[in-house]
Structure formats: structure tokens, C-alpha cells
């Protein structure tokens, strides 16, 4: 594929931890963390719905862990900041309904080693997964989604840490960043959009000033070279928000979770799924591979695709695309990937230690707001395969 250098503007959005869909993602992943705590072999497919003072937890869960579904859900809601009983959704007022049953034995025999017709753990479903990396930010993430995340994350940090100063902020918010690209690289931020839930007594000028201050903090000066157009609460006010304003569901923010519309997406959501589900684990592995390829200097940008059949361990296909920026031809890079990385589900889980997040200082709940990629706490963000990739690449130069 030829390198694209045409000047253009690209836009990505992010949503905060208080967005109704993100509330649900965090509850589903907090339940996953609780299941894995005492039973690393738990099988979890947890879906959450949240609306006016109601949380519904459903799905297929097989675990030996003792889990109090209601307490976990309400604790997540409380930590996000939904504690005001007047906003239609709060930890003290919300009722929790639970409709959970065990994983289907038809699925279990495909993902449990020794069951069914295969001797090793197979993929939890069919489908294709993608991972992406680009050298346009130090985190090797697309700039638009990276800075959109950092804006809402910083606003939430201030809301939590300085309630006396920012007490007019409520948990639900969204951001959007548009960046002009020249010669394939981010040149300047064109537009920033922020919609933030607030109290009735909020002074709009205060929110506008805060957004501009946060943008200056999180976006580098070299990208603030033009006059940025700001749209802050463009409808005028945003008092009714969260699950009271818009019903939330697990898994509805898959582009926010990944690369902000840059690259491709296989369609599978992440939150609430244990690592036997390749929708999640293989997407993490593809990011790990793509990031290490870019970090190794083998490409300026890289997208990795894998595909699986349910119950089958070996991927059906592996595809690498570098958009004309690779030091090797893409078909050669695929051979490098196969030489360095094992993409069987059990190997992915072992490589990234996906069954033991707490022992390694992270949690699945941490992934469920502000992006699954681009934050160093997660094991798929390591760049520890650079030397192996460079050595393997020499064979094909």
C-alpha cells in the first residue's frame, strides 16, 4: 500500500469514566477482576445495562470465586462519582438486578485444554482482531485519540482531586480532537470539542477556561501552533447526563477503546470478557506486536490482523500492513511476526499474563475508561521484543 501524504484533517473522540456506556464497561470488568482474583481459570462474559437508578448485570460466568455482584457494581458507581441522589443515578439509590448463568458447555469444550476434540486451548470464538501503532506520539498511538483521552482523563482527575474548586463538574463528559496532518504527520490541532455534565449553578465561562487550560497542559505546544476552535457544551447546557440521561450498555464504545477510527476494527468489544475470548486477548496481542514493530524502527506505522476459528488454537491468518512506511515488504514482515510471536490463545495469555492482572499491578477495570491502549501500566504496551524483531528482520533484508 502506498504511503499517504495528502494533507487532511482527522478526528477522534473519547468519553469519560462517567459516560453511561463506560459505567457499564467498568462494572463488567470489575466483575471480571473479582472472578479472576481467586479463580484465574474463570470464564466470564459479563454484560451490564445502566439506566435511571437501575443496573442490570447479565451474562455467562463460570467461576469458583465468591463474588458479590451488587456490591461490586455499586462500588464502581460510587468511585466514579455518582453519589448525588438528585441526578437520577447514584450508588445509594440504584437497584441491581442479576441474571447470570454458567458458560455453555459447547463453548467450554473449545477453549479448555483437553476437552472436546482438541488437546490444547482453542480460540473462544471465530473472528478477526486488529492491533495498530504509529510513531506520531511517544506512546506510539494516533495523536487524535491519545489527546482526546488525555483531555477527559485530566478533567476527571481534577474533579476527583479538587472538589472544592471543580465542584460544578459531574461525571459524564465527552471530548473530540481534530488534527491537521501534513506529510503523514500531525501538524496542528484544529478543533477541540468538550461536552461536560455540570451542576445547575455552573458558570459556562469557567468551564470554557478550564477546557482551554487542560488542552494547554495535555497537548504539546508544537501542535498548538494555530488558533484552535473550541466548542464547549455547544448545546448550551448539560445538566442531565450519565445513565439517567442515556441508557448505558457494555461494549458500545469500541472505537473509543481502540484507535479512534485509525486503522481497522474487527467488531468485537473487550470489556467483561475473560482472556480466553480472543476478541480481547488477541487484540491486545496485536497491539503488542504492532507497537514493538514500530518501536524497533521497522515501520512508522503498522497494523496487524489475525483471524481465528472457534476451538482452533493456531490463527487462520496473520496479516501485516505498514502503509508504505515499512523497512521490509509487508509479506516479509509477516514472516518476522511468525518467527517472534506465538499467537495461539494459551501462549497469548501466558505472554501477557492475562489471568493475573492484580499480581502484575493492573486491573481489567483500569482498561475500561480512557482507552485500552497507549498507557504503560498494561503488559501489551511493553516494547521488550525490539532486539528479537530486529534480528529476525535481518534475515529478510
Image (cartoon, grey):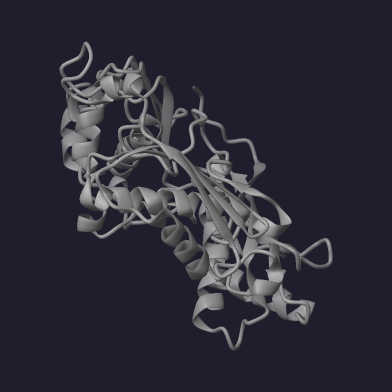
Q: How many marks?
A: 0
Give 268 or 386, whichever is nearer the viewer.
Answer: 268
Horizontally, is 258 left or right of 140 in the view?
right
Q: Position of residue 381 (x, y in %)?
A: 32, 49
In this rendering, does residue 311 appear at all? Answer: yes
In this rendering, does residue 397 appear at all? Answer: no
Q: Is residue 91 above or below residue 133?
A: below
Give 281 or 2, whichever is nearer the viewer.
Answer: 281
Task: Name the quarter where the C terminus is drawn.
Answer: top left
Q: Position of residue 274 (x, y in %)?
A: 34, 39
Q: Residue at x 59, y 88 (%)?
A: 164
Horizontally, is 181 left or right of 379 in the view?
right
Q: Position of residue 211 (x, y in %)?
A: 65, 71
Give 255 or 168, whichever is nearer the viewer.
Answer: 168
Name the outermost residue toward the right.
Answer: 236
Q: Is residue 90 above or below residue 135?
A: below
Name the outermost residue toward the top.
Answer: 117
Horizontally, is 59 left or right of 102 in the view?
right
Q: Position of residue 376 (x, y in %)?
A: 33, 56
Amino acid at each position: 500500500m502506498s504511503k499517504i501524504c495528502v494533507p487532511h484533517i482527522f478526528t477522534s473522540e473519547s468519553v469519560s469514566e462517567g459516560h453511561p456506556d463506560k459505567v457499564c464497561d467498568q462494572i463488567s470488568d470489575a466483575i471480571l477482576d473479582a472472578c479472576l482474583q481467586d479463580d484465574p481459570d474463570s470464564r466470564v462474559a459479563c454484560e451490564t445495562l445502566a439506566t435511571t437508578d437501575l443496573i442490570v448485570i447479565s451474562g455467562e460466568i463460570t467461576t469458583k470465586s465468591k463474588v458479590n455482584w451488587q456490591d461490586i457494581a455499586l462500588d464502581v458507581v460510587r468511585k466514579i462519582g455518582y453519589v448525588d441522589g438528585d441526578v437520577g443515578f447514584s450508588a445509594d439509590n440504584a437497584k441491581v438486578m442479576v441474571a447470570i448463568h454458567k458458560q455453555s458447555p459447547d463453548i467450554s469444550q473449545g477453549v479448555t485444554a483437553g476437552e472436546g476434540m482438541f488437546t490444547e486451548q482453542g480460540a473462544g470464538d471465530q473472528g478477526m482482531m486488529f492491533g495498530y501503532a504509529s510513531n506520531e506520539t511517544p506512546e506510539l498511538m494516533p495523536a487524535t485519540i491519545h489527546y482526546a483521552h488525555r483531555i477527559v482523563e485530566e478533567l476527571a482527575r481534577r474533579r476527583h482531586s479538587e472538589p472544592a474548586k471543580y465542584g460544578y463538574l459531574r461525571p459524564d463528559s465527552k471530548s473530540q480532537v481534530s488534527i491537521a496532518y501534513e506529510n503523514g504527520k500531525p501538524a496542528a490541532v484544529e478543533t477541540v470539542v468538550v461536552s461536560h455534565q455540570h451542576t445547575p449553578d455552573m458558570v459556562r465561562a469557567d468551564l470554557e477556561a478550564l477546557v482551554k487550560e487542560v488542552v494547554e497542559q495535555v497537548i504539546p505546544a508544537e501542535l498548538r501552533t494555530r488558533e484552535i476552535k473550541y466548542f464547549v457544551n455547544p448545546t448550551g447546557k448539560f445538566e442531565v447526563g450519565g445513565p439517567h440521561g442515556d441508557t448505558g450498555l457494555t461494549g458500545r464504545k469500541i472505537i473509543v477503546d481502540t484507535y479512534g477510527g485509525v486503522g481497522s476494527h474487527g467488531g468485537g468489544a473487550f470489556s467483561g470478557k475473560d482472556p480466553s475470548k480472543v476478541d480481547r486477548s488477541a487484540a491486545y496481542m496485536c497491539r503488542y506486536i504492532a507497537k514493538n514493530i514500530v518501536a524497533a524502527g521497522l515501520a512508522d506505522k503498522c497494523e496487524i490482523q489475525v483471524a481465528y476459528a472457534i476451538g482452533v488454537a493456531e490463527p487462520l491468518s496473520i496479516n501485516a500492513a505498514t502503509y508504505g512506511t515499512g523497512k521490509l515488504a509487508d509479506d516479509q514482515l509477516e514472516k518476522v511476526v511468525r518467527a517472534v510471536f506465538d499467537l495461539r490463545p494459551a501462549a497469548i495469555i501466558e505472554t501477557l499474563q492475562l489471568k493475573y492482572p492484580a499480581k502484575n499491578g493492573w486491573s481489567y477495570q483500569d482498561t475500561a475508561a480512557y482507552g485500552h491502549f497507549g498507557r504503560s501500566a498494561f503488559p501489551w504496551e511493553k516494547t521488550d521484543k525490539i532486539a528479537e524483531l530486529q534480528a529476525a528482520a535481518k534475515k529478510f533484508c
